[in-house]
Amino acid sequence: MSQPKASAIIRALMYRWLDVHVATVLPNYTPASWWECDVFEITKSGYFREYEVKISRHDFLRDRDKTVEKWNGWDQPKTVENKHELLARGDPRGPKQFYYVAPAGMLSHSDLPVFAGLIEVKPDLWFAEAKVAPRLHGQKIETKVRDWVGRTCYWRMHNLLRESAGQLISPQPDPQPQEASA
């Protein structure tokens, strides 16, 4: 059986694993002051979890180099923030828990940073929690962030419905003008 693509893993993770565990889940969402999450989750108790899907060891190894330049004002130098360093420190802008999601057997516990858990993907797109992610901090997500996530869900659904309606109701071509007979 061939290796599943990241998009298939994300869909299966959302519908088979997270559907029973969460209040809100979004694919490819970027919370304010954080990096894009392959899968972003708000738990029923109001915490943020992140799931990072990796389909190759090379992709996993590159992940530790994720950085962003932060602008600090006109008279201040820019600073560089590294995602792994912030996760290791338990920065409250980040998730309460962080999971890698990878094909079964691709990663071992010794490969994982101390801040990360692991969910293994079986070839049939079923999941097993191989390592529980540690709690990085205890800060719940703010109400305004939760509201923004809700609006994002609404607009994503709205746009999907518009796209599908456009495919169902395609415009009819204009009738060809008939030439006048003499």
Image (spheres, rainbow, N blue to C red):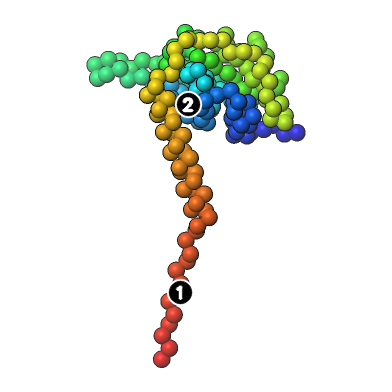
Residue 64 shows in this picture: no
Horizontal side of residue 53 vs 154, given as left or right: right
Residue 106 position, x and y percent, is 68, 20
**Residue 176 numbered mark, or none:** 1
Q: Taking 148 as reference, is 37 left or right? A: right
Asked whether the residues under the numbered discs 1 and 2 touch, taking CB atoms below 8 Å apart as contact, a structural biologist would say no
Q: Report which residue position mark 2 lands on.
A: 36
Q: Quadrant of the N terminus?
A: top right
Q: Can residue 155 be seen from the camera position used here?
A: yes
Which residue is rendered at x = 68% and y = 20% of the image? 128
Amino acid type of the residue that numbered disc 1 sits on in the rendered structure: Gln
Sequence order check, earlier mark of 1 and 2: 2
The x and y percentages for residue 178 are: 44, 80
> For the residue marked with disc 2, what is the amino acid?
Glu
Q: Secondary structure at mark 1?
A: loop
Q: How far across and down, in percent of the image, does residue 114 sit?
A: 57, 8
